[in-house]
């Protein structure tokens, strides 16, 4: 656990403090982040490739890697993704250096001890506005390529803001007050959020997570009309018929630093983040 926590801290610190803002306007900063992610994956023994994502007369890159599974080759891969860009004006520690840190630690653990299924680890570019919710998102380009190549996908997991937790009664908000009747009022849990078509996959991973981890988890499978349900890269995979959900600390429903200069490395809880990552890795062993 300590090694996971140390790796998480190092990645979040490097991306949010050493590099800082990684918006679409900061092409040099995004290039530094991409190089950092690629070198990390290579250091774990993973082969990598860059996928071009053209946007506004620039070329951005998804960083793609794969760890072969030990099971039946045609059982369908799992894609684990996290966007490494940040919104304009923020260092993006929780959003989304925390997700990238989780992705890298999962890649390290998986490369050391491969899972039954083949896992594709992808660091996406251009999740944030103005590409957000358009076909210009890095995740949209990647999901489209999977569809075009005929890749069998068991499911996709988007790591979207994983590191902010609060334990004061009422610190956890929801799109409607009715949710507070069924979900916790403290932000001390991690959430699995997907659409109705992805419910079976979401529940599969949630069940496996609960069996190996005592960390609190809540899930929601709901239509996109509920604000936030489709606010990440999993949305792109829905567009091509893939099952997908996001793992999140619920973003602006909990973190007051969302999309602000206050989204810094020092605001995150790395011990809890490490528990989430370890639990997810163990869960994936049973998928």
Image: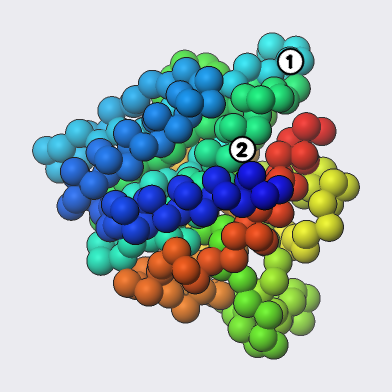
Q: Residue at horizontal 36%, vertical 37%? A: 36
Instruction: Check residue 20 in the rendering and tell me which mark sits there, or answer none.
Output: none
Tally the numbered discs: 2
Q: Taking 225 as reference, is 179 above or below it?
A: below
Q: Taking 264 as reference, is 234 above or below it?
A: above
Coordinates of residue 218 in the picture (x, y in percent):
74, 62
Lateral position of residue 47 relative to residue 209, left or right: left
Q: Residue at horizontal 47%, vertical 68%? A: 266
Q: Residue at horizontal 57%, vertical 49%? A: 6
Q: Return the residue nearer the eye: 274 or 56.
A: 274
Lateral position of residue 233 relative to residue 211, left or right: left
Q: Check the image and tell me how it is coloured.
A: rainbow
Identify the residue under disc 2: 106
Q: Nearer the viewer, mark 2 or mark 1?
A: 2
Mark nearer the N terminus (2 vs 1): 1
Crowd band around label 1 with a 10 angstrom C-alpha radius: few (<14), some (14–19), many (20+) = few
Coordinates of residue 223 in the picture (x, y in percent):
60, 58
Q: Taking 266 as reference, is 45 above or below it?
A: above
Coordinates of residue 81 in the picture (x, y in percent):
51, 40
Coordinates of residue 149 in the picture (x, y in percent):
47, 16
Q: Secondary structure at mark 1?
A: loop
The reply to whether dot 2 and dot 1 touch (C-beta < 8 Å) is no
Q: Residue furthest right?
A: 211
Q: Return the residue nearer the eye: 133 or 207.
A: 207
Identify the residue under disc 1: 70
The residues tagged by marks 2 and 1 sit, at their Cα atoms, a distance apart of 16 Å
Crowd band around label 2 with a 10 angstrom C-alpha radius: few (<14), some (14–19), many (20+) = many
């Amino acid at each position: 656990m300590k090694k996971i926590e140390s790796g998480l801290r190092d990645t979040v610190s490097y991306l949010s403090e050493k590099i800082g803002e990684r918006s679409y306007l900061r092409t040099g900063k995004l290039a530094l982040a991409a190089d950092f992610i690629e070198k990390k994956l290579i250091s774990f023994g993973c082969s990598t490739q860059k996928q071009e994502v053209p946007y506004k007369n620039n070329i951005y890159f998804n960083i793609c890697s794969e760890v072969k599974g030990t099971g039946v080759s045609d059982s369908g891969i799992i894609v684990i993704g996290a966007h490494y860009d940040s919104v304009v004006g923020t260092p993006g520690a929780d959003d989304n250096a925390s997700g990238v840190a989780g992705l890298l630690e999962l890649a390290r653990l998986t490369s050391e001890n491969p899972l039954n299924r083949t896992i594709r680890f992808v660091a996406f570019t251009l999740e944030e506005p103005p590409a957000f919710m358009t076909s210009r998102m890095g995740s949209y380009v990647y999901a489209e390529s999977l569809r075009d190549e005929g890749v069998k996908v068991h499911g996709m997991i988007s790591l979207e803001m994983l590191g902010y937790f609060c334990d004061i009664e009422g610190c956890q908000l929801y799109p409607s007050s009715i949710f507070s009747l069924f979900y916790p009022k403290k932000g001390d849990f991690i959430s699995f959020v997907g659409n109705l078509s992805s419910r079976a996959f979401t529940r599969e991973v949630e069940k496996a997570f609960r069996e190996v981890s005592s960390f609190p988890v809540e899930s929601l499978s709901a239509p996109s009309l509920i604000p936030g349900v489709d606010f990440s890269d999993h949305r792109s995979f829905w567009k091509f018929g893939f099952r997908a959900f996001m793992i999140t600390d619920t973003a602006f429903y909990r973190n007051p630093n969302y999309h602000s200069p206050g989204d810094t490395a020092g605001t995150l809880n790395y011990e809890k983040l490490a528990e989430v990552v370890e639990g997810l890795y163990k869960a994936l062993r049973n998928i």
